[in-house]
Amino acid sequence: MSTVRTNPLATAVAERRFCYVVELVASALRREWQVLEAASRLARVPQLVAGSITSYAGGALGQDPIRVGTAARARGLTPNVHVTCVSQDREGIRKTLEDLHALGLHNVFALTGDWPREGTPIFDIDSVELVRMIAELRRGGMPFHVAVAVSPFKYVEADQLYQYLKLEKKIAAGADLAITQVGWDAVKFAELRRYLDERGLAVPILGNVYVLGPRAAERMATGQPPGCWVSPELLEAVRVESRAPDKGLRARLERAARTVAVLRGLGYAGAYIGGTHDADQVQWVIRRADALATQWEELYGELSFGRSGGFYLYEDPRRSATRRAPRAAPPGDRATAPAAPSSRSTLVPRALDALGRLFPVARDTPLRRVLRRLFAWIDRRPPLARAVERLELAVKQPVFGCQACGNCVLSWMEYVCPQTCPKQMRNGPCGGTDMGRCEVLDQPCIWVAVHERATAAGRVDTLRTFVPAPDRSLRGTSSWINYFLDRDRRPDRDDQDAGRQVR
């Protein structure tokens, strides 16, 4: 019997039936029995095809998602287990995947993960590299069904476009399903659908539908958890609703149901419901969404809580009269957006590009052969090799922030060093940015600079190239020597598929 026929989530997606997944937050604040009791009740909701079991939600260590997922399945709820790149190296992550396979848990949600609040952070690989690892295991006979995340709710141009570009890389790596980040902006939901349709990318999408109460709204208004944002208008609406006798419960369930109706009208594959574990509330949302299905275009105009003055990829022709026109961003909002690249910031990339054309070494040329022999001779003399590494660091650290990883990929990243990203990702931004700024450090996200430089140079398409995780054993060695001796990991030599671009 095939995996698709025995996996409710994969089956619903393959058959194009609108389906529902509920996020089960297995945090340390909830006892495991409470989560499992909720899972037992949710298992009786017929439209629900999976419960998504979180790991490191919001950066906090919670219940073991594998144990919770196994117990939830025993209670009748198909688990979709979050697998993050937080606090495990690649071998640990591979072991986690092997354990999931041994237990017959094959629905996984592949995520980079939020920055941990406690402990020493480890980000050995990113989510694109994780999907490639899972795809490799799948080719070896482990029938994983892979969901990945994407945020259409970014309001800085380079940040948003890189989110979509990174989703393309995840699809090329082997993703089966995409799930959006939290947001309340119908135009952005439509934007993502159109972006994929125009590129012939038929990956199914679940829209994130969060049952937003006042406490969560207050937190998200400050950008917490990372990547989740509530507009001032929506925050005020939730505050007003919470003064009702039911504390705003009916209003937030209604908003969730209306969002589901919009998603169905836009052609989404389903809804990913968060903010509640209550089976009765989930069933109410589903029934109400069914009743509202024919009104989705009117409701589309009401779901309009985007960022004032923010970036939109397309002009929306269905903007209704009830939708608020975008107003100018206040000075505070403008100040948080990253500035456009200056001529000075693009001077180094242009100079290095010219140098590469003048002295070609990226292919087999006489110069490359001479340099290969030279660096091989140096490599056999450890004191000289160390001196070269020190020289390289002295040149590259002040210019690029080099941290001597030994696997330099500057030329594939518009000469922005990935080691300057706190999560050391090599294939695009995480979903935690806020107006193009890093979720961890008070600095612009490095990927905004990468995209802006690539745009200025007319080579955004090259950013679709998969960049492999570095060989960590080369840390502290010269990437110049490693490059000419073909010891490093980079796109043009990772494997026969590594340098392939998304089509």
Image: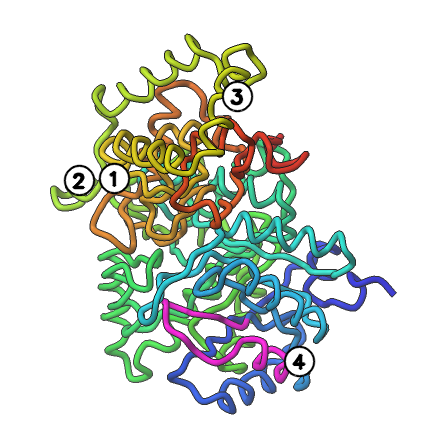
- Crowd rating for badge 2 (residues with CA inside 10 Å; few <14, some 14–19, many 20+): some
Q: Hey, which residue is sitting farthest top in the picture?
A: 358
Q: Is residue 203 positioned above or below 458 on the image?
A: below
Compute the Cα span from label 1 to label 3: 56 Å
Determine which of the numbered discs, if any, sits on residue 373 in the image: 3
Residue type of the residue flagged with mark 4? Arg
* Mark toward the viewer: 1 or 4: 4
Residue 430 pos. (x, y %): 41, 50
Q: Residue at x 24, y 29 (%)?
A: 340
Indicate left or right for 175 with 465 as reference.
Answer: right
In the rendered structure, which disc, 1 or 3, sits on the residue that comes first in sequence?
A: 1
Which residue in the protein does label 4 denote?
73
Indicate left or right for 46 with 392 as reference.
Answer: right
Compute the Cα span from label 4 to label 2: 48 Å
Q: Residue at x 30, y 36 (%)?
A: 390
Q: Which residues are magenta?
A: 53-73
The reply to whether the C-beta atoms of the residues labelled 2 and 1 are less than 8 Å apart is yes
Residue type of the residue flagged with mark 3? Arg
Q: Is residue 109 positioned above or below 419 on the image?
A: below
